[in-house]
Image: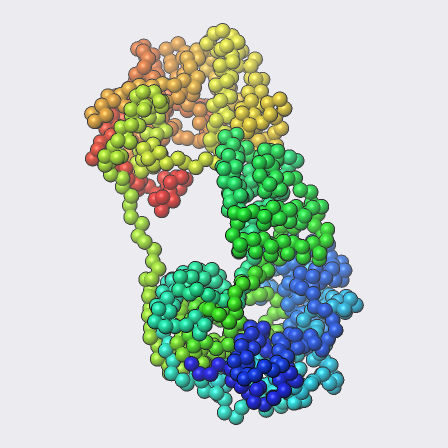
Amino acid sequence: MTTPFLLEIAQKVIDKHPRLEEVTLVFPNRRAIVFFRKHLGTMLRKPAFGPTMLTIEEYIKGFSTVQVPDKLELVYRLYKAYVATVNSKEAFDRFYYWGEMLLRDFEEIDKYLVNAEMLFRDLSHQKELDATFDYLTDEQKKFLLDFWGNFDAHKTENRKKFLEVWKHLFDVYTNFRLQLTSEGLAYEGMVHREVAESVLKGETIRKGSEIFVGFNALTKAEEVILAHAVAGGATVYWDVDEYYLNSAAQEAGDFFHEYQQHTVLGKTFEAQPPANFRAAKNIKLYGAAQPVGQVKIMGQVLAENMVVGEKPEETLVVLPDEKLLLPVLHSVSDSVEKLNVTMGFSLSATPVFNFVELLIELQISRKEDYFHHRPVLSLLNHPYTVAENLKVVQSKQKAMLKHNWVSVPKNFLASETALHQAMFTAAETTRITPYLKDCLQVLGALDTLYTFDKEHIFQMVKCLNRMEEVLGDQYSDWRSFLRFFRQYVRSVRIPFSGEPLQGLQVMGMLETRNLDFKNVYILSLNEGSLPSDGNKGSYIPYNIRRAYRLPTLQHQDAMYAYLFYRIIQRAENIFLFYNTETDILGQGEMSRYLQQLMYESGKKFENHALHNAIGVNEVKPIAIQKDNGVLENLAKLNEQNIHRQFNGLSPSALNTYIECRLRFYFRHVAKIKEPDEIEEDMDARVLGNFVHNVMEAFYTKIVKQKGSTVIDAQDLEKNKSLIQGLLDQEVIETYSLDPNQPVMYEGQLILVSEVVKNFIGKILEHDKKHAPFIVEGVEQTMEYTFSINAPVGKVLLGGKIDRIDRKENLLRIVDYKTGRDKLEFKSIESLFAREGDRNKAAFQTLLYAWLYTKTNRTTGLRVVTGLLNGKNLFDDDMEFGLTMDRQRLSDVHSVLPAFEAGLKELLEELFNPETVFDQTQKVDNCKYCPYKRICYR
């Protein structure tokens, strides 16, 4: 590798300045200072006082006496200035996103010395704004919707409202600056402008002993300040290469081409710029499918190179896409002992962020002394809570499922562990941050957490402290606090601990300025990543930005082009990685910088296009053969049924087998339990249970009170008032409510109550028309042992019939269905057909009828089976019974022989050792299947 840039500068500084303590060196960032200090130390032969080393921000701030608060305080102060100026009542959490954007605009306006009054005047008069707001991104329009409640760019009133804000922006800008100045505060742009304007007024700030190292893409204020210093004797060392400096076509040199024309800065360029890019380079290009493919291949290549002698200290991994940081760290962990990460890591990507989010959502869900089960279960399942005490977590989860608690009592939750006591307290809105910090304090004291988890917790507490300091009691409700919390914490970065001069270096593009490495790995060389397509948003549209020479996308592209060429110009071994897959809009195609390097540089590339490095495995059909183990489980299933440990194969189980043999295997043979969930919505199961249980209790109570199974219309009319009390009892048992307290119907329960009572009312209306009749049984279990031609010999079939009633010679088998199940089916054969639109409800009721006729004498009786469902109950012309091939089944005796034959064939197939448990071909059947993740359906 050629001599690193900072080593060259160190040598020049030593040669030209024997008294280093009199020199001030200014760098683009602190990382460059660390590496420069290392190079300077290796070159000094004896101890000496070192030079002053500053970043450009520190250097400029040194000429001002004001203080620069952090971003949170600045945005909050901007909010107060905005509210006062515009007379707005917007909440801070809804302003924060726009406040960040407006602060960035103010920063740029001042750093580029723009006449703010003229710019904002042009903004408010621009016809383009009054047209369609087309320059706004979708994200910006989304936030406008949230900010103003109802935003439509094409509605006149919204355009007027939007423009009104624009008209006040200069006033907001002015008042914000005045407010800060009055308290001795400023944002960075204000400081830059103050110092630059002092220079332009002829005030001398220069010292003459400054050395400016490795700058590029200067703001107008920085340009004025540097030129002033150079005019006073300061030195500038540009980190450039003749490859792009001497070519007007290379955008990497755009800024330097401007500076070369500058009356002062132009004189600081060397007559013969360095030509490090010409040196021989070993360049290898790797194309891989998807970002994870790049990371995997990069890790393999790095590991191989380390084995053959590549030194970690001479190696840099560059990540244009910061989302790859953790995958990269995982990928290289086995190859290097030490590494240093300069990028920082978003606090919002840590488990503690999710933990605090859940705490806030928990408090939002609280009603008096109850928490909603969803945030409760999420908190109980959080890794931190599990790490504290897994047994307590599991015990509480089981109790919640057992009682089907939609709302969970606080006293039940806030017990047994210190963390549970802290989390599940009823926190008032006056104690938002104290409550969160109390929970984090208990969490941070756990011995079961890793060191890095405790560091993340510490950083979160710092964030909450800062929010408390700046905002005070700004928030009076949990929802608005959550909105702000999410926005604010996403911008907080956690520094990685590590030795900056040892081990493998992992950096973002901006951190690489002034640094050189022998071995360079660059990932994500695709459009959208390098250059980035990230639009941070601005109140200032493109045409006005360009007119006032504010940064545009072209500015950003030129800056990243320079950073790309700069990091490889002195490198010897260069490994470049890109994604081979693009989307339909071309997003993600190979980076233009990489294409320029391939086709314009004349360099030779070793190309490795691994298009299939990451592929999607073909989903193979699943078919479970009935080997000895499966046959043994199947035989045990039937043995258990025969010995009455279970109530036989039910209609539901057989319907499952017909619909999908594999689902039957998972549920009934392999015993893979379907996940338990707390039922809170009025789904078919909850509603159905209420109807069935209330109807059973209703008829049981009448028969018991009357001492007779004969029911007449008067019985039904007289006892219909029982329904509400019976429903109350069901709700108490279902949701484990206090039986000594009246049931409070609210939310979903109001709807449940009305639907159930209306449905049962319709059943009773139907029953009154049919009365008098004899109740033969309610929720009656029927079982029958059926002989089949299979190794098991006999199979126990069973089911529970909702109601059996008889009127004269008509025996009805009644099935309540709260849905809109069909009453029609084509033929008996269609009920057993796996393909086509089979009627599961008809199969079930006919199986009930078959079971009844097998276990009871029905000679002389006409047996009719049918549904009372949400469709026919509301039909005034309803006629009870099923319809086959458009003909009403007035007596099922006529079809039961064919049904029995089909049933026998089905069961013989089920217990046949030669058949398999395979997947259904009807993918629609998989939509709500709990096992679809196993099948990849």
Give the color scheme: rainbow, by chain, secondary structure or one colour: rainbow
Please name the residue shown 60% across and 25% down the image.
738
On the rendered structure, is 806 left or right of 18?
Answer: left
Please name the residue shown 60% across and 41% down the image.
418
Q: Residue 662's quadrant in the figure?
A: top left
Q: The C terminus lies in which quarter of the figure?
A: top left
Residue 909, percent from left and from top: 24, 31
Residue 457, percent from left and from top: 58, 53
* Residue at the outermost front position: 46
* Residue at the outermost right position: 182
Please name the residue shown 55% across and 29% down the image.
735
Residue 558, percent from left and from top: 52, 77
In the image, residue 832 sits, relative to residue 506, either above or below, namely above
Question: Closer to the camera, 884 or 841?
Answer: 841
* Residue at the outermost top position: 707
Q: Residue 55's quadrant in the figure?
A: bottom right
Residue 511, percent from left and from top: 53, 71
Please name the residue shown 47% across and 66% down the image.
339
On the rendered structure, is 514 left or right of 124?
Answer: left
Q: Is residue 678 visible?
A: no
